[in-house]
Image (cartoon, rainbow, N blue to C red):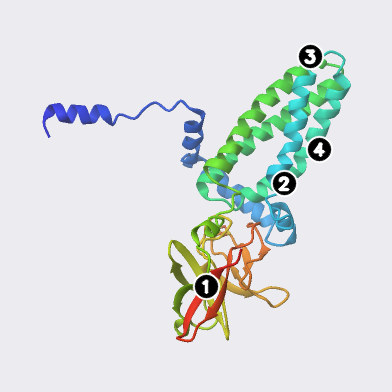
Amino acid sequence: MSGRASKMFRRGTRPMPRTHPADVAEGLEHADGLDGAIRSISSTINRILGPGPAKDVLHGVPAGHPAHPPLTDVPIGCWMSVAILDLLPGTDRAAQTLVAAGLAGAVPTVLTGWADWSALHREQQRVGLVHASTVGAATVLYAASLVARRQGRRGVGRMLGYAGLTALLTGGYLGGHLAFRQAAGANHADQVAHLTSLGWHDLCPADELPDGWPVHRRLGYISLFVMREGDEIHVLADRCAHLGGPLHQGRIVADQNEDTCVVCPWHGSTFRVSDGAVVHGPATGRQPSFETRVIEDGTLQVRAVP
Ligand code: FES
């Protein structure tokens, strides 16, 4: 390469300064200085909140959707309203009530948030930790604001409220980054319905499937979890609905009804193999499943269940 070309190349690849808020959030994804704190908080949460019904409720398994995002509406809605009321005369009592309501709403919001956070990838946990810290700071500021308002120091209460709102909006932005850029909480198996054409598809010879042991097969672009159980063959999408873990590498267990289930190797979501129903979170969405049949020549065929 000539000296001139080399200079042009160097000029062309110089990194641009990162000034957009999304760039800052992306930078947090790689902030490995947070990992020590993440490890210790994760192990504390997992010690206090082991797998089971309580954790499933916090994840939102009974509702079929993550519980944390809708719960954030309560403190955010209350505290945004306080910011408007604080600009108007004669609204002190209403503002004080809404600050208190926001604090009450923050309790389940925080609990569900930490439960979800404990089952994320490390890059998501880094952003999530800063998100939780800023929202935690907002909560402390609103608690101080409530105390000041109750003591009749309305000016201080309002100032603390606006400081809390600033922290809340920062935390909310990072929550948006987690949900929409890093896809935490999204269903990672939803695209299966769009990648499968209607009707039956040949998959593989049925007699090559081991009994009682899951294997991986491909149907076009889709990875499938395939498991024979005697005369029955169960087929699910292989990418876990939670964060895309490979279900064919999971453990096979029986639930309390003795139904056969697979436990995702990444964060322990448990799905019934016959229909993909969620038995335990953190996944909240059903795993896409396929109908199966074996035709005369012994070929296993599959058809997506709508
Ligand atoms: S990827 Fe998290 S439980 Fe499967």
Q: In this view, does 7 lie to the left or right of 42?
A: left
- Pointer 1 local density, CA inside 10 Å: few below 14, some 14–19, many at least 20: many
- Quarter of the image with the C terminus is bottom right
Q: Position of residue 202 (x, y in %)?
A: 46, 74
Q: Where is residue 215 in the image (x, y as percent from the top left)?
A: 48, 74
Q: Which of marks 2 and 4 is nearer the N terminus?
A: 4
Mark 3, residue position = 155
Q: Which amino acid does label 4 sit on?
A: Ala
Q: What residue type is labelled 2?
A: Leu
CA–CA distance in space, label 3 to label 4: 23 Å
User: Do callouts 3 and 4 mark residues in contact (Cβ within 8 Å)?
Assistant: no
Q: What residue type is labelled 3?
A: Gly
Q: Earlier in the sequence, mark 1 or mark 3?
A: 3
Q: Which of marks 3 and 4 is nearer the N terminus?
A: 4
Q: Can residue 151 be seen in this view?
A: no
Q: Earlier in the sequence, mark 2 or mark 1?
A: 2
Q: Is residue 100 left or right of residue 120?
A: right
76 to 90, vertically: above or below? below
Q: What element carries label 2?
A: helix
Q: Is mark 3 on a helix, strand or loop?
A: helix
Q: Which amino acid does label 1 sit on?
A: Val
Give the residue displayed 55% in from the left and 38% down from the top: 177
Q: Earlier in the sequence, mark 4 or mark 1?
A: 4
Per the rendering, the mark at residue 111 is 2
Mark 4, residue position = 104
Mark 1, residue position = 302
User: Do callouts 4 and 1 mark residues in contact (Cβ within 8 Å)?
Assistant: no
Mark 1 CB near ligand 1 (8 Å cut): no
CA–CA distance in space, label 2 to label 1: 41 Å
Q: Earlier in the sequence, mark 3 or mark 2?
A: 2
